[in-house]
Amino acid sequence: MYLTQNLAKRLPVEYPQAPRKNLLKLLVAEHKSNYLVSPPGCPKIPPSIQLRQYQEQAVASWFANQGRGTLKMATGSGKTITALAIASELYQKIGLQVLLIVCPYRHLVSQWARECEKFSLKPLLAFESVHNWQSQLSSQLYNVRSHSQPFLTIITTNSTLMGGLQTQLKYFPEKTLIIGDEVHNLGAPKLEQSLPRNIGLRLGLSATPERYFDEQGTEFIFDYFGSVLSPELTLRDAIAQGALVHYLYYPILVDLTESEAYAYARITTKIGWILSSEDNSPKNNNALTALLMQRARLVGAAANKLQALRQLMQNRLDTTHTLFYCGDGTQEGAIGKQSSRQIAAVVKLLGSELGYRVNTYTAETSLSQREELRKQFADGDLQGLVAIRCLDEGVDIPAIQTAVILASSSNPRQFIQRRGRILRPHPGKQRATLFDTIVMPPELDRQTWEVERNLLKKELKRFIEFADLADNAGEARKTLITLQQQYGLLDL
């Protein structure tokens, strides 16, 4: 049932060129039993979960790819369940001993823990202070390696993987599966160096595994975890198969103020200089990313969005389960001044002026507060949540009926993550509604206009795709035509 001591010597060690394709075959050959009765703490698909056809296909694809691969599936379509189904089947096929799940943020650790418990797992949560978990992890790893404990599940964060977990990685047995959740984050230089090379069974999860303006990071993700597996599940596929709900989409066009328009034109000109330089160095790419983020913050905090929000919500004061996205969404960390000002202004407008019951949900909200807010929101005690990026990736609040996007970055990942968040099924939720504030670019000189047109073309494709899949596609497209006409993009 267990690996021979010589198995590791027989495994190829080249990295990343050789993905050790024979690893899974060797592990299966070492495993004598065709079926294991799963004791407590070992992965087992619960009777209440019936995998969809595309999930079963994804499981089969991962095994066919010899224990490597990345699931690229629409947000909300069940990547977590698919991943745990793979772990369950691995336990049956090879006697999997350790499951290591790596998440970008703390709140996703709690969410993964809830899902793991449905699969009979008893996860060890290894994050924050090493004093809370390190000795327990050492003890359980020893027990697993000595076969006195059948299985160990560890859920950690990216930052803990880089830190306190590093000294423990060498003790993980060969029969370990690592799952990278929101795997696009793991392509960052510091994070990629922290990933364990001695763990051969690997699974990446993301609706958007490709990194924005980072081909090298994207290449590393696929080298380490494996290529994208079939089937890829698009938003259209997920809605057609009932994994996500239908929706209404209402773009709201907003003009910049005079001072905002001047700053916008100045930043766009600088972006044009970099794009025309044909310099693909990391320094230039970093400068471009910084400018795009700067422009996104400017657009996100546009003053006229508050007036648009007031007009929208004056007729919706009796609604509940509404999510308001604010801020620039650049990173999970301290809230920037612009984001803080916008959140405060939105809460003041909704709560103090309109009497709409809201609270904030940000990176600074404690885990215990987040759980309480989730419950109040689901129960309707809170009519709305005002959030920034911490509700972009992985967070499961399916009770959301309506979303108002007041700010978003130019990164397509954010748009894709958010729409999937909004469209998750929930009892009694027949259809979702999304209001998307889109800033109209100001009048620009001819050269800057061309830069703006090229940038806008990419973003408009996303808006149009989302409009075309909406139940009110014609109405949504009619609003976007104004923007298309201004920049000669009617062919999109």
Image: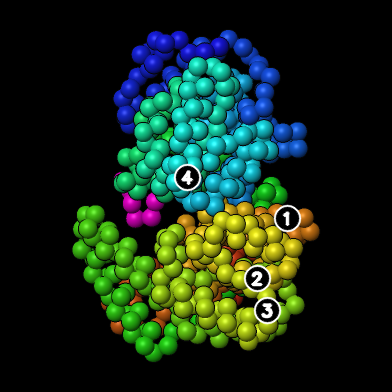
* 426 with respect to 215 (left or right): right
Q: Which residues are magenta?
A: 209-217
* Number of the front mark, 2 or 1: 2
Q: Are marks 2 and 4 in contact (CB under 8 Å)?
A: no
Instruction: Tell me which numbered mark, 2 or 4, is placed earlier along the sequence.
Output: 4
Q: Are marks 4 and 1 in contact (CB under 8 Å)?
A: no
- Please report the residue visible at 58 percent of the width from the left and 9 percent of the height from the top: 32
* Number of the front mark, 4 or 1: 4
Give the residue at mark 2.
384
Instruction: Tell me which numbered mark, 1 or 3, is placed earlier along the sequence.
Output: 3
Q: Amino acid at mark 3?
A: Tyr
Mark 4 secondary-structure assignment: loop
- Please report the residue visible at 43 percent of the width from the left and 34 percent of the height from the top: 226
Give the residue at mark 1.
426
Give the residue at mark 4.
127
Give the residue at mark 3.
356
* 277 with respect to 208 (left or right): left
Picture coordinates of residue 145 (x, y %)? Answer: 48, 19
* Badge 3: residue crowd in 10 Å (few <14, some 14–19, many ≥20): many
